[in-house]
Image (cartoon, helix red, strand yellow):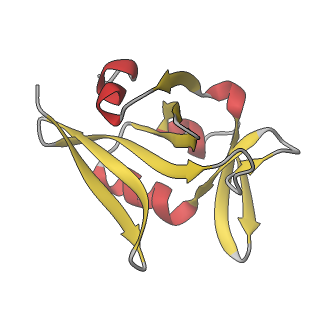
Amino acid sequence: MVITRERHTINGKTVGIFYLVDGVYKLYLMLTSGEKTRLLDTKLNAWRFSTLALNEARRKGCVYVGMLHKIGKNRLVYATHIEEMYGEKSISSSYKGQPQRLLSREYFWFNTTHTEGYIANSVNIR
C-alpha cells in the first residue's frame, strides 16, 4: 500500500491536503491552526467546511473528509464520511460571503497525532 499526498491550493494558498492510497483519492483534510480557528463555529460546536473544497473532494472521489487542526506542536485529526457533510445532519450557511457546510463535532472521529506520517495509521482508510 502506497500513501501519497497532494496539496489543495486556492489562489496560491494551501487550504487542504488530499491523501491517495495506491493512486486512489481516499481522504481530504482541510488545514487549520490555533485555539481560536475561524473554521470552528463555537455556537453550534461544528466544523465549517468550504463548499468549494467539499465539491472538489467529492469530484475526486474522496470517501472521507476532515480537519487537520494544529495547536502548538500537537496535531488533531477530525474525520468523517463525506456523505455526512451533505446529509440531514449538516447545515448549509455562509461565512464572509462564501457558501459553507457545517457539521457538529460529535459526528467526527477524533485522533491526536504528532507527525503527518502518523495520519495514515491513525485514520482507518478503507
Residue 44 drawn at (x, y percent): 84, 42
Residue 49 drawn at (x, y percent): 60, 54
The quadrant the N terminus occupies is top left
Q: What residue is drawn where x is 35% and y is 35%?
A: 116
Q: What residue is drawn where x is 64% and y is 27%?
A: 107
Q: What residue is drawn where x is 12% and y is 42%?
A: 23
Residue 113 drawn at (x, y percent): 45, 26
Question: Is 44 positioned to the left or the right of 70 in the image?
Answer: right
Q: Quadrant of residue 88?
A: top right
Q: Nearer the viewer, residue 72 or 84?
A: 72
Q: Nearer the viewer, residue 8 or 35?
A: 35
- For residue 55, above or below residue 27: below
The extreme front residue here reads 73
Question: Is 103 positioned to the left or the right of 30 in the image?
Answer: right
The quadrant the C terminus occupies is top left
Q: Quadrant of residue 70?
A: top right
Residue 97 drawn at (x, y percent): 71, 77
